[in-house]
Amino acid sequence: MGCPGAGKGTQSAKLKETLNLKHISTGDVLRAQMAAGTELGKQVAALINQGNLVPDGLMISMLQNIISTTDQGVILDGFPRTVAQAQALDDMMKRLGRQISAVVMIDLPQEEVVKRLSSRRLCKKCGKPAATATQAACECGGELYVRGDDAPQSVKHRLEVYRLQTLPVKEYYQHSGKYVEINGNQTPDQVFEDICNVLKKVK
């Protein structure tokens, strides 16, 4: 978990490789629908480009379809984002006979969020972020672009949505005994080391 720009995707990708976990980014799942031009994708595009959240029932259904087809451990990247989603996720995991092992919150000051997102560019081909602000193209040769929801006005709206709807999820999980906060205002390697140290303690 974490606010927009906290590094959820970056850390999830590293954990996937290190711990052999299945990485499920709800953002990637939804953008795949948009790229495919499906009717669902068109509905999702309108919501995401305005910085709004996708309906809970839709997200849970999509996640259950993915999780039910794998025996691997799973990283949920950027989900749940509301208390209702967290409750629905708990119910879904029970139905599947699985459980949440740890809830990792990557904490980041708002000023750093704005700084990161306003300069973030992603690859149209592989989806990875540019390594530096001056990088002309991705290492894979793909074109770099700025996501519509990373535009300044959308970022402000996304942070407001996060404050109102997602922070209560923190309180929901704080009493679960599985919640931990990581300082996201460090280098990616330092954040990764902190997360790994937390996961080593998970039973």
Image: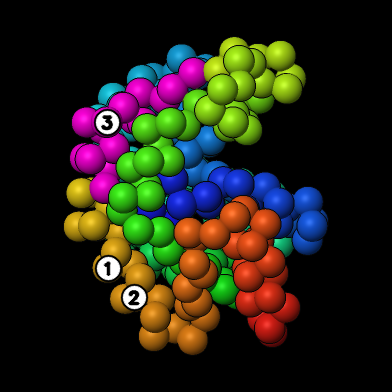
Numbered disc 1: secondary structure: helix
In this rendered view, identify the residue nearer to me: 95 or 144. Answer: 144
User: Which residue occupies 43% across, 31% down?
Assistant: 119
Task: Indicate the amino acid at tag 3.
Answer: Pro
Task: Indicate the amino acid at tag 1.
Answer: Pro
Q: Position of residue 12 (x, y in %)?
A: 63, 52
Numbered disc 3: secondary structure: helix
Task: Indicate the amino acid at tag 2.
Answer: Tyr
Find the distance from the CA under tag 1 to the CA under tag 2. 6 Å
Identify the residue position indicated by label 3 in the image.
152
Specify few, some or many for label 1: CA neighbours under 10 Å numbering under 14, 14-19, or 20 or more. Answer: some
Q: Quadrant of residue 125?
A: top right
Find the distance from the CA under tag 2 to the CA under tag 3. 30 Å
Find the distance from the CA under tag 1 to the CA under tag 3. 24 Å
Label number found at residue 114: none
Q: What secondary structure characterizes most of the magenta part?
A: helix
Q: Position of residue 194 (x, y in %)?
A: 63, 70
Identify the residue position indicated by label 1 in the image.
168
Q: Is residue 191 magenta?
A: no
Whichever of labels 1 and 3 marks the residue nearer the N terminus, that label is: 3
> If the image is split into quadrants, where does the C terminus sit?
bottom right
What span is in magenta?
Answer: 145-159
The answer to whether one can see residue 74 in this image is no
**Decide: marks 1, 2 in contact (CB < 8 A)?**
yes
Numbered disc 2: secondary structure: helix
Identify the residue position indicated by label 2 in the image.
172
